[in-house]
Amino acid sequence: MKNVTKYLTKNLIISIVVFLVIAAALSTYSLKNDQPNEIQVSQLVSQIEASEVKSVTVRGNELQIELKDGTKEKTQKEPGESFTTLLANYQVAPEKMTGIEFDIKKEGGVTYWIGTLLPFILPFLLIAVFIWIMMRQVQGANSRAMSFGSSSAREIPKNSKDRITFKDVAGVKEAKEELMEVVEFLKSSKKFIALGAKIPKGVLLMGSPGTGKTLLARAVAGEANVPFYHISGSEFVEMFVGVGASRVRDLFAKAKKNAPCIVFIDEIDAVGRQRGSGLGGSHDEREQTLNQILVEMDGFDPNQGVIVLAATNRPDVLDPALLRPGRFDRRVILDEPDINDREAVLKIHAKNKPLTDGIDLRRIAERTPGFSGADLANLMNEAAILAARRNKTKISMSELTESIEKVMLGPERKSYLLSEHERRVTAYHEAGHALVAHRLPDADPIHKISIISRGSAAGYTLKLPIEDRRMHRRAEFLADLAMSLGGYVAEQEIFGRKNLTTGASSDLRQATRLARRLVTDFGMSDKLGPRTYGEKEEMVFLGKEIHHERDYSEKTAELIDSEINQLIADAKDTATQIISEQRQDMEKIVELLLKQETIEKEEFEELLGKKEAA
């Protein structure tokens, strides 16, 4: 309705402009600067009797008069009446006509017909033009309606300027090796077919957000130098049943014409969720679309040379039919980059950015464990923005390190001013975290302490592992629990239980969640033994709901709560013992924090000494 109103308004404005232009042209044509004066017939008779008339030109019913002094006039006679009869009716003496030049001209030519017919034709012309414009818009709307089921996939042709290859994707070595088979098939499919080998029709890229799934899919197309069709799973689905299936058919029809090529469906879980979980039954639009994808990928009509790549960070919700052999039978997992991969990613994103001499990207990689490729790209971009705001021509190490904290915690809240008492509470809170982590051998080393607000935190303590770890020990989790409660314990020891603040709410939530996972997910409880408790299942009903299925009794639930409480109590006792025994060290940290607001790793180790190895 909005588009129709827009078209009508546009057409109305065009019609008004055309009408005004034509009216202006006609008025310019008809109104001339030398237009003669119009007089009555009686005046003409008087002028003839006074011998003032030089000539009279009869043009139809119009009499054009020129006086002896050069004045031009005009008048109208009755239709069908001759000029001679007119003079006789007014009893003009014949001798008065002597010396007057008479000229009778017959009307005709283009000017005559335009002047005669245009006043009648012009309204019809304007109406016809308006109807023609409206019909064109209606035909355009009909053509758009007819193309409603066409695919909106964006094509990146081969040899495109935006073409990228595996060289432009750092890390993910195993994933690139797995996808090289797809590249080799697209480059030279005959050698595979000659041996009776069938290349996988579908490759599912799985990984956390920002790990480079879309980038890797584009790199496959660039490496193989074939057309690349990119569409999001949500673009298939409309409110009308059958539109998504029609778009799937249209997409694969385009792909077959341009084979060999790659079809990339981003966020396939938008249409690939397990069937039967919605409200629409077999007529649900999403399920119709999924059914068509299943048929196109492995139905009666094989897709030779068309390889489907798909990306998702929710493989657990996909329909089993999508994952069976013949469809997405290859699953490539993209993990978070390790320290070497992070350094390589940083080098790629630093190519077009001027860096000062001596910048060590390895140190930045060490300080960014858990960062995805997208996080690292954002880090370099934030550093460039920060350097530009400081009117620098090159990016220095200070911008890079500050950008790490901005990506992790958010920007500094310089306008968020704490009172002197709140600054002291925050300093003791962060000093408690840092002291406990420093004295526990299994905790990660402290890299920075700050009481400058970032994001929603009044202060923060940054600890980072020495090396990337894929597996974690129980001792590390227990040290993290004690460290999380260090701020809470420090506030209680210094200000008393009555003066505890809300600053520890996030720490307590994190500690509770970690303790529950130790008991229910990791099997690290002495009393409950090596098993898991509870199954998470996603239920879709008028929205998203995470349903926790309890596969244990009420008695076991009480025991789980008891074990969680025991873990947190033990962690609190550990933190209390460290803080009470090393109160002087905590006071040193607080004094330095209140003085300069931040403490870097080197200053911290000078203050308390090197951390003991585990």
Image: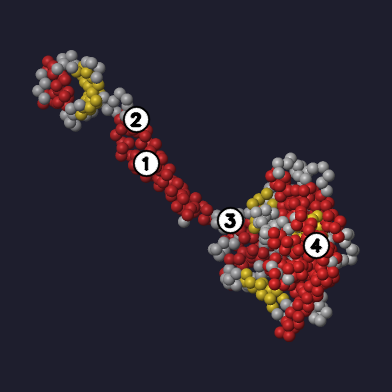
> Answer yes or no: do the residues labelled 1 and 2 have beta carbons within 8 Å?
no
Considering only order in the chain, which callout, 2 or 1, is on the residue closer to the N terminus? 2
Q: Which residue is mark 3?
A: 150
Residue 530 visible within the image: yes
Q: How many marks?
A: 4
Q: Which residue is mark 4?
A: 587
Task: Give residue 550's quadrant in the image.
Answer: bottom right
Q: Quadrant of the C terminus?
A: bottom right
Q: Where is 473 relative to 31, above or below?
A: below
Q: What amino acid type is highlighted by mark number 2?
A: Tyr
Considering only order in the chain, which callout, 2 or 4, is on the residue closer to the N terminus? 2
The answer to whether 559 appears left or right of 605 in the picture is: left
Q: Single out the mark in the foreground, 1 or 4.
A: 4
Q: Which residue is mark 2?
A: 29
Which residue does the image show at 53% across and 55% down from the upper left? 146
Q: CA distance from mark 3 to mark 1?
A: 38 Å
